[in-house]
Image: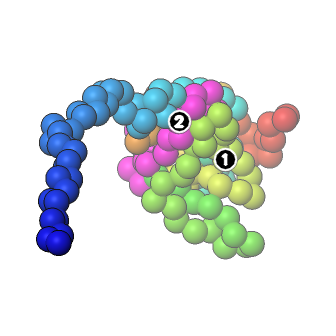
Amino acid sequence: MRKSTTATAVAMPLLLAGGLLLITGCQSEKDALSTGKADLAVSGAYLPQPAMTDMAAAYLTVKNGGGKADQLTSVTSPLSGDITMHTTEGSQMKHASKLEVPANGELKLSRGGTHLMLGKLAHKPKVGEKVEFTLHFAESGAVKVQVPVESSTYRPQD
Ligand SMILES: [Cu+2]
C-alpha cells in the first residue's frame, strides 16, 4: 500500500503591504501648552533719595497676570549708565544677570531684598523728581516706568 502524501496547501494569508497611514493632526502639543503669554504690570516703583551722588537703589514690583514666565534681563535709565540687578543673601549682595517673573506671579524688589543698584549717577536725584527707567524683558520687550524719588526713609505700604 502506498502511502500517498498529500501536500497540504497552506494558504498563506496575503499580508497587504499597504500599511495604514496614520493621519496625524498638525496641532502640536507645544502650541497648546504655550497659549499663555506674559502680561506684565509694574507698580510701587520708588527711588529713595540717596545720600551720595555716586550711588542709589530703586525698588518696584512686576506683576505677571499671564500664563507664561518672563525674565527681567536689564534696566537702563538716563540717570545712570551703570544699573545692575542685585539679590541679597544674608548681608551680601549678589549680582543677578536676570530676574524671573513667574507666570501668574510677581517679581518684588524691596529694601533688604532684590533691588536695582545705580552707579555713576548723572546727578543727585531729589524728592519729587521722576526718573525714567526702561525695564528690558526677555518676552515682553522694553517697558518704560516713571520712578518717583522719595525721601531716604520712605517705605511703601503693602
Ligand atoms: Cu546692591
Left or right of 71 in this view: 13: left
Q: Which mark is residue 68?
A: 2
Q: Is residue 37 above or below residue 69?
A: above
Q: Quadrant of residue 91?
A: bottom right
Name the residue rendered at 16%, 65% in the picture.
5
Q: Quadrant of the C terminus?
A: top right
Q: Is residue 85 above or below residue 104?
A: below
Q: What's the magenta region?
A: 60-82
- Nearer-the-camera pick, 111 or 13: 13
Name the residue rendered at 66%, 39% in the picture.
106
Q: Quadrant of the N terminus?
A: bottom left
Q: Is residue 94 above or below residue 69?
A: below
Calculate the distance from the C-alpha at mark 2 to the C-alpha at mark 1: 20 Å
Where residue 99 sits: x, y (%)? 54, 51
- Decide: few, some or many residues near mark 1? Use Cα within 10 Å; few <14, some 14-19, many ≥20: many
Name the residue rendered at 40%, 42% in the picture.
138
Where residue 147 sits: x, y (%)? 59, 32
Q: Which mark is residue 109?
A: 1
Please report contact status of discs 2 and 1: CB closer than 8 Å, yes or no: no
Identity, as a three-letter code, of the amino acid under mark 2: Lys
- Nearer-the-camera pick, 80 or 11: 11
